[in-house]
Every structure is written in C-alpha cells, then in structure tokens.
Amino acid sequence: MTNALPAEAPGPESIDTVEKYDRESRTRDIWSTKWALPLTVFAVGLSLYQIYYALFGGPPTLVHRGIHVGAILVLCFAVQRFRLRETRSTPPWFDWLAIAGSVAIAVYLAVVFDRLTVSGGRFETIDVVFSVLCLVLVLEAARRVTGLVLPILAVLFIVYDYYGRSMPGLFRHRGYDLDRIVTFMYESTEGIFSTAIGVSSTYIFLFILFGAILQKSGMGQFFNDIAMALAGQARGGPAKVAVLASGFLGSINGSAIANVVTTGAFTIPMMKRVGYQRNFAGAVESAASVGGQIMPPIMGAAAFIMAETLGVPYTQIVLVAIIPAVLYYLGILIQVHLRATSQGLRGISRENLPAVMDVMKERGHLLLPLLFLLYMLFFSGTTILFAAVTTIFVTIAAAMVRKSTRMSLLDIVHALRDGALTAVSVAVACACVGIIVGVATQTGFGVKLAGTIVTIGGGFLLPTLLMTAVACIILGMGLPSIPAYIIVATMAAPALVQLDVAPLAAHLFVFYFGLFANITPPVALAAFAAAGLSGGSPMRTGFLAMRLALGGIIVPFVFVYQPELLMLDGSAVDTIRAAVILLIGVTLLAVAAEGHLFVPLPIWLRIVLALGAIGLVTPNHVLDLVGAIVALAALGAAMFMAKRQERLHWREI
C-alpha cells in the first residue's frame, strides 16, 4: 500500500464554495428516498442505450438526439435543485410536470418523424406546442446547470431572430415568426438537436462514462499519488503536484470548475502548509485546472466537437494540440518553481510521500485502459465510438486485476449511473447552445460578425487576433468549456479564417481564449472557486491565475503565425525549432512575471526580459534577432547581479 498524504475532507465552507461556483453540484439528496431505485434504473438504462447505439446503431439521427435530450432533461429535473437553497430531497410538483414534458418531447419526435421527413418545413399547431415546450425545458435546465448567462444569451438570440427587420445596418435580416423559429429549433438538426447534441449523444457521453468508470476504479487516487511521488519532494512540491494532478484529471473530466473543487480540496491546503500564499495557491489550482481542457488525449471532450465542426479526424486534433498544451503547463511549472525559490519553500519530506514503484505496483495497471484507448484511436483503424465502448470494457477488466481497484457489480451500476448524471451538464449546455447556433445559421449572424471583426481590424491579422481574443473571453464568461467553444467557434473563428488563418489554428485560438474566461476577472469562475477553497481574494486569485497562464496567452498567437508549431506546415525540424524557441520565450516570460532568477530582479529588468521574450517568439526574423540579443543581455545582467551577491549557483535557480 502507498503511504500518500490523505486528502483533507472538505469542510462545510468548502461544500458551500463548491455549490456556489459549481452549479452541477447543486443536486438533491434523492438517493436517500424511495425514488433512488427507479432513477438509478433510468440512468443506467440511458448509459446502456448509449453503448448499444454506439455498437449497433439505432433510430434515425433526429429521433436518437431527441431520446438523448429527453432522457437528460428527465435526469436534470429529477436531480438538480430549482434554486440554490432548496432543501427538499424529492422533486416538487412542477418538476414532475417538467419530467413528463421531457418524456413527451422525445416521444413526439419519434411519433411524427416520418411526417417531418416529407413535410418540407410545413408545421402544424401541435408542432408549435411541443417546440415551445422543448425550448422552455431546455432553457430552464440550462439555468439550473450553467447559470443565467447561457439561457439569457439564447433568449437574446431568439429576440434577434424575431426582430431582424428592425436591426441596424449590417445585422439586419428578414426576421422570422415565432412559430417558424421554435419549430426550426425543435424539428430540425440545425437548432437544439444540432452538431453539439450530435456529438454529446455519441462521443462525449461515452467518454464521460469512461471517465466515471475510471474514477470508480480509483484512477483519481492514482493520479494524485503518482503526482505526489514524482513532484512532492521537489522545491515547492505541493504546487507542482497540483499542476500535474489537475492536468491529468482535467483532460478527462471536462470541467475546469469541477477540476478545481475536486483536486483543489486536496492540493490547496498542502500548498498553504508548505508556505505558498493563499491567493497564489488558488491561482495555481485554477490555472492548472483550466489547462486540462487543452490537454490531449481527451481535452475535456471539446476535441470531438472541434473534429466534427471542422470535418477532420479526431486524432489530428489531438496531435496538433500536444505541443501548445505541454508549453502551457511548463510555463506554470516554471513560475511555481521560481516562486518557491524566491520564498525559500521546500517540498514534502520523503517519509510522507509514496514511492513511485509502490504507486505503480498498487494502481499502475489502471494505465492500461488509457494505453489501449490511444492504440484504438491512432493505430487500430476503428471508429471513435467503437474505441470508446471497447475501452470501457477494458477498463472494467483492468480494474479486476487487483483487489484494491476491483469493482463489484454494484460499483459498475453506480459508475453507469454516475456517468449518465455527469453527462447532464454537458448535454444540457449543448442543447441550449444549439439555440444560439440555430439562430446564427438561420440569420447568418456568425458570418456578419466575422466580417465586422475583420473590418474593424482593417484587414490586418494582429489587431483582428487581439479583438477576437477579447471577444472570446467576453463570450466565454460564466460558461462551461464546451458551450464556450461552440459559441466562439461560431462567432469568432470565421473572422480569422477570412484572413487565411488555417481553420484548425483558428479554432484552437478561439478555444484557448474562450477557456481563459474561467480565470479572467471580472467573471473568473474557476479562480473564484479556488479562492473559496483557499480563503483568498477572488479577484486577486484571478489576476494571479492570468499571470500563471501567460504561456497559454502567448502560445495561440504564435501558432497562428507559425502553423508548424501545430505540425500543420513545414518539416519536423521546423516544428522542433519553433517549439524550442517558444519554450525559451515562455521561460523568459515566467522569469519576468515572477521577478526572480538567482536573485530578486528589479522592475526595469523584468520589463526588458518580457520585451525580449516577445520579440523572440515573433515570426519576424529581425525581431527574433533583436529579441534574442535583448534577452541575452537581460539574462547577463541578472547573472551579474547574482554573482555580486555570491548567489550565482544552480541551487539558487
């Protein structure tokens, strides 16, 4: 057995923090009531249906998506509270009506599907009634799961769709009657049941289910233990553990806030105990948790939607995302290390840490499903759906190897149930964001907005990139990563494509900055959740998280100008050269941000280092040379200062 430090059980204040910022955790205690068994049967049934559909197919696309959304809405209204302070364990009468309505919209789609296929867009009064019902249920479910931002945005888009003739200038369109709008959203694959729900009802659900089974087998504990074993004893070890563990888990669980409250309850107290200031501890956890969404192979499931949107293989998304993601985490680790050096912080003593070999012996076999998944995705030639389903079975089999990870039949049932419940937040958000995408499709809003951004940017790439980044941060405020990506991909990415940016680079660019809304004040939910756990200032934690994420802020600009960093252009040598130069630039930025290299650095030297780093990573060869000279001069000055203080030694780095 490993002798890892036990995770601290979250106290009442931590639970309140979780519920305040992670709306998905605001669930009823229905599992202690008589409804626990039927709800478990329903959730497990949904999981088994999704597995069956992946293996053998099923009803037509629209009907399948309707079943998926209807079932997800049933779970949402059964489990999610109507308001934060609700104390009852069972759904109130109006939620039972919502549950009945959720079943009805799925059944009605199946019943009238044959008529819809030949109707040519014509609809009846009963179609309008069920369309309005579906729209209201999706908006209310989104309010419970994601907060007010997404449903309000969806309603504003519907208003825009209706009042199109009254809109000024470029954004004027023909306008549509309400009955036409609502039936378009419900009875087509362009609205609620658009690509987002298509991906949710196939790839995303299965990978969430895979993650739930991994967690039930003890993979979360394995990630924590192996991170502790690898980095716990290093200088400032707990912060490095937080970065590694959050990166591992973030790629699988798909939610930055959930990642913060899951790993943060364990890592933030450890960081504070070794001497990290509470705001910095929260910033480390939030920046690392957000980065999990850009970390292959799963990337929080956004990679599947990106692949579907662009029409490129999922494996290509994973490959091109590797270098930027690694550089992002290296930037955080370097700043964490420099902070520990400047404050003289140490790691955890070896006797309080697990040994790598002990951890691998106890739970290392849990890596087999991940290795199998990579093999199936990259080398087997099978479909993603088949790879996901078979990996689920392999995970269950691998967990049986040792008693400590072996799952009973009840554990498997609970994993199937938990997977379906975890999918609620993603599916509801995808359904709601489908309304926004549907309006953009119906009115051409996305194309018009892209043209406006390009026009304001004067047709030049850099100002357009800057405006797009700001627009993505604004559009992503208060949203989970997947709906944030879908919105920015619809509204902002086309502007970059118009300026001849490679579509994959454009989508990764907007994805990065849509994610950074989670750590960008004034609405930085991941940072605010981390501050709630650390007892720090939410705004201060957010700004520190932004500083830690400097590498992630500069990397997207670089890969737009130098697509060889994404392996989209040039040779392997070009890719390696670009990656090495960018690594140097990210390192210099980290030094400038922390203001320490051997010795504390004066502000003027930090500014010079930052300017040198920015010059070094530009695509202009003259600026590259100037940046390199400036950076070398600044480093020389720092080393001279360290030598005068007799601290020029590798132990002082």
Image: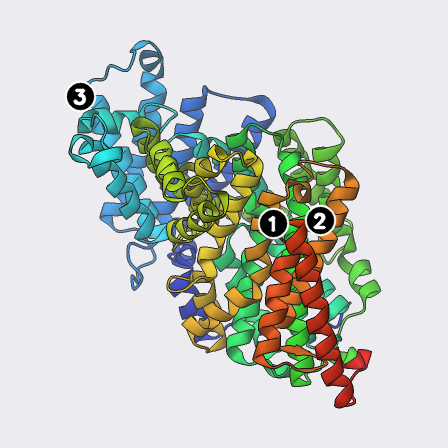
The answer to whether residue 412 of the structure is visible from this angle is no
Q: Three-letter amino acid code at disc 2?
A: Ala
**Residue 395: mark:** none
Q: Any mark on residue 578, and which?
A: 2
Up-down: is 354 above or below 559?
A: below
Q: Position of residue 365 (x, y in %)?
A: 78, 51
Which callout, 3 or 2, points to the residue nearer the camera? Answer: 2
Residue under pointer 3: 125
Disc 2 vs disc 1: Cβ atoms closer than 8 Å?
yes
Residue 315, relative to residue 554: is it above or below? above
Q: N-terminal of the two: label 2 or label 1?
A: 1
Is there any visible trace of residue 550 in the rendered image?
Answer: yes
**Could you tell me which residue is drawn at 37 percent across and 46 percent down?**
76
Q: Residue at image x 35%, y 23%?
A: 188
Residue type beneath disc 3: Thr
Q: The disc labelled 1 sits on which kind of residue? A: Val
| Farthest-out residue, top | 118
Residue drawn where x is 26% and y is 34% of the image: 170
User: What SS does tag 3 mark?
Assistant: helix
Residue at 38%, 51% in the rendered image: 34
Q: CA distance from mark 3 to mark 2?
A: 60 Å
Q: Is residue 132 above or below residue 403?
A: above
In the picture provided, is 18 more to the left or to the right than 48? left
Residue to which mark 1 is pinned: 558
Q: Quadrant of residue 508?
A: top right
Residue 569 position by quadrant = top right
Packing grade of label 2 (10 A; few <14, some 14-19, many >=20) is many
- Across and down, in percent, residue 51 comes to 57, 32
Q: Quadrant of the C terminus?
A: bottom right
Q: Quadrant of the N terminus?
A: bottom right
Q: Secondary structure at mark 1?
A: helix
